[in-house]
Image (cartoon, helix red, strand yellow):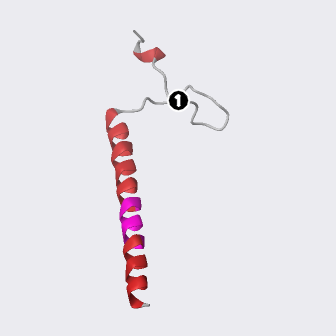
Amino acid sequence: MLTNDRMPTMGTKTVDGDQAYETFITRDQIWNWQANCQRAVDMLRQKKRMSSDAKVIAAMLQ
């Protein structure tokens, strides 16, 4: 098992690659990332449905 000082991070976050001041990713940050991804997927699905509805309406008007 890895100890806290050996836990993996997401890579260097500084331009020069200095890892001395890196912090670990918290569960809250992961959950926030998951929630943001789910919202984005839901928005894309909604836009796709709206696009399909617009095509149907345009076809009906012709």
Residue, far bottom: 62
Quadrant in which the C terminus appears: bottom left
Q: Does the magenta stretch include residue 21?
A: no
| Main secondary structure of the magenta stretch | helix
Q: Please determine whether, in this image, residue 43 is positioned above or below residue 24.
A: below
Residue at x 67% of width, y 34% of height: 16
Which region is colored magenta?
44-51
- Looking at numbered disc 1 in the image, what kind of residue is underneath it? Tyr
Q: Where is residue 3 in the image (x, y as percent from the top left)?
A: 41, 12
Q: Nearer the viewer, residue 46 or 25?
A: 46
Tell me: 48 left or right of 21. left
Q: Quadrant of residue 45?
A: bottom left
Q: Name the residue under label 1.
A: 21
Q: Nearer the viewer, residue 2 or 4?
A: 2
Q: Nearer the viewer, residue 42 or 10?
A: 42
Q: Please determine whether, in this image, residue 18 is positioned above or below residue 53.
A: above
